[in-house]
Amino acid sequence: MNRKFYFYTVLSLILLIASACQNSTNQTNQTNVNSNQTTTASNEIPNRKWWKEAVVYQIYPRSFKDSNGDGIGDLKGITSKLDYIKSLGIDVVWLNPIFSSPNDDMGYDVSDYQNIMKEFGTMEDFDEMLKGFHDRKIKVVLDLVANHSSDEHKWFQEAKKSRDNPYRDYYHWWNEEDGTPPKRVSFFDPKGEGWKYSPETKSYYLHYFSQKQPDLNWENPKVRQEIYSAMKFWFDKGVDGFRMDVIHFISKDKPFKEIPAEFKDDYGKFYGSGPKRHEYVQEMYREVLSKYDVMTLGEAGATQEDAHNYVDEDRHELNMIYHYEGVSLGYLPNSKKIIDPKGWKLTDFKDIYTRWDKNFAEKGWNTVYLANHDQPRMVTRWGNDATEFRELSSKMLSTFLLTQRATPYYFQGDELAMSNIKFDKIEDYRDIESINWYKQIKSEGGDLKQFMESQKIAARDNSRTPIQWDETENGGFTTGSPWLKVNPNYKTVNAAAQEKDENSPLNYFRKLTELRKKELTLVYGKYTLVDKDNENVYAYTRELNGKKLLVLLNFKATESTVNAGVDLSKAKVLLGNYKDFSTDGKLKPYQAVILELSN
Ligand code: NOJ
C-alpha cells in the first residue's frame, strides 16, 4: 500500500515538473516570435501563427523596377529596391508569376515551372533576390499557376501531337467524332468559347482562360506529381509559400455534360465546384505542404462554407484563401465588370466584410484586400482620386486594410496612393482580358462606349502601370520604353517626393504597419461592427484581453457623423489621417482614426 502511494506521488511529481517545463517552453517560444510586441499579453493568445501576424506586400514584377532598360521590370530591379520594401514594415512579399512564360496572360501561362521568365532575369538573380529578402527577415511567396499551363509548355507541345502521346492525358480533350463538345465558357477567349479545336488530332482542348492556357488534367496522378515536384523544387530553395491561382478550378466535371441550369449565369461558380477539389488539395498538403513551414493562400472565389473548408486547420488544406465578393460590389451582375449606374452602398460593403470576418471567427483565418493585379487601383475604385481627396481617402482605405481581423494583402503602389490611368483607347491596353472582352462586345454589337467607360474604373491594367519612383522620365521605372504607359501624374505622385513629406501616404502606411506589429489586438482582437446602418461611416471595435480599440472610417467626401455608442472624449488617438479629431462623432471628409477606449 505504502509502496503504491510512494509510486503515485513520485509519478505525479514527475508529471507536474514536465508540464511546468512544457508551459514555460510555450511561453518562451511565443515571446521569441514577437519579442517586439509589448502592448498585449501575447502568451494569452491561442493559435498564433507568423502568417496571421504578417502584412503581405504584393509585387507585380513586370511593373516594379526595370534594371536593364528593356521597359520591363525584373528581379534585379526588385533587388535594387529591397531597402525600400523593408522600410515599409511589411513581413511577406508575394510575387506575381516569375516562371518562364510567353506572357499571353502576363505570366499566368507557364511554359516551365522550374525556370525564370527570361525578361525577369536568371536563376542567379532569383537566388540573390531571395537572399536579400531573407537577410532582411522578409519572407517570399511565389505564385503557383497549376490549373493550366501555357500551350508552349513541353507537355502541351507533346500532347497535341497525337492521341497516343504519353503527355496526352496531361490535358482535357474532346474528340471530334463525339460531336460538338458541351458548352464551356472561357474568360479570355475573343468569342468566349472554352473549347479550342486542334487540327493535328481532330479534337478540342479545354481552356477556361485564353486559348494559350490549356487546363491541366488533375485527374491524372502524373500531372499532380509534376506540380508537387515543382513546388518542392522552390521550397527546397527556401521559398516561404505559394499563392495558388484559381485553385478551386483544378477538379473538372468529367465526363463534361451540359452545365446545370442553376450555373448558367455563373460559370465561375460551376468551375469552382469540381467534385475532387478538396481531395486534391489535401493530397498536396500530405505530399508537399506538411513537410515545410510555409504559408499558402488559395485564390478561390468560393462560397463562405467552401472557403471555410479550404482553411479549416483540421482538414489540412490551405492556410488562407481570398474571395471576390468584396471586390465585385458595384459591378452589374455577371457582366464584364460594367459599372452599376446605381453605385455601391457602404452598408453592403460593411455587410460583406463583417460576414467574412464571422466566417472565420472560431476557426480558420481571414484575408483582406482591396486591390491586386486583377483589380484597379484601390483609391480610384473605393476612395476618391480627385486631387483634394486622393491622399486622404487612400490613407483611410489603408487604415481599413490594416485594422481588420485578417491577413492584409497590400498591392504595390497603393502605399503611394497611385491612381487609375484611365485609358481612352483600347490600343493602350496590354491586358488580354480588356482586349478580348472588347473584341467580344464588338463582334456581338454590344455597347463599346459603356465598356470603355467602365474599364476606366475596372480594368486590370490600371493597377499594373509601372511604379512611380521619382519625377524623372517614366517615373524612374525604366530608362527604356515602358511595356505599359506610366501614369502621367508621376511628376507629383512618386516615392521620392513622399519620402520627404512626413504626412505622405507612404509614411502613413509605415505608421500603420508599425502599429499593427505592436498592437496584437489589431491582428487577433474580436471584431464588432458599430453603427451598422450608417451609410457614410464604417466603424468597428477590436477587442483582446481587456483592451478595446475603435476604428472610425468616413467613406464620404463630406463631413459625416458616427454614433459610436461611447464617450469619445475619453478615447486615446493611436493613429489618424488628420491632425485633430473631434470627440462629438463628426468626421471630416475621408477621415480615419484608430482609438483606444478606456475601460
Ligand atoms: C487569376 C489571376 O489572378 C489572373 O491574373 C489570371 O489572369 C487568371 N487567374 C488566369 O490564370
Image (cartoon, helix red, strand yellow):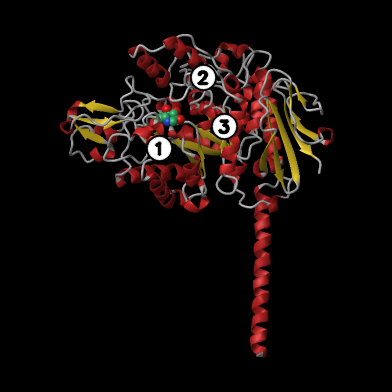
Above or below: residue 593 compared with residue 91: above
Q: Amino acid at mark 2?
A: Asp
Q: Which residue is mark 2?
A: 340
Q: Position of residue 427 (x, y in %)?
A: 42, 10
Q: Are marks 2 and 3 in contact (CB under 8 Å)?
A: no
Closest to the observer, 276 or 428: 276
Circle 2 sits in a helix, a strand or a loop, which is it?
A: loop
Q: Which residue is mark 1?
A: 272
Circle 3 sits in a helix, a strand or a loop, which is it?
A: loop
Q: Considering only order in the chain, which callout, 3 or 2, is on the residue closer to the N terminus?
A: 2
Q: Which residue is mark 3?
A: 369
Q: Amino acid at mark 3?
A: Tyr
Q: Residue at x 42, y 35 (%)?
A: 246
Q: Considering only order in the chain, which callout, 2 or 1, is on the residue closer to the N terminus?
A: 1
User: In the shown orientation, is residue 554 left or right of residue 320?
Assistant: right
Q: Dividing the image into four quarters, tell me where ligand 1 lies.
A: top left
Closest to the observer, 264 or 440: 264
Quadrant position of the C terminus in the picture? top right
Q: Are marks 1 and 2 in contact (CB under 8 Å)?
A: no
Q: Residue at x 67, y 26 (%)?
A: 396
Q: Disc 3 and disc 1: Cα gap in Å?
A: 21 Å
Q: Are marks 3 and 1 in contact (CB under 8 Å)?
A: no
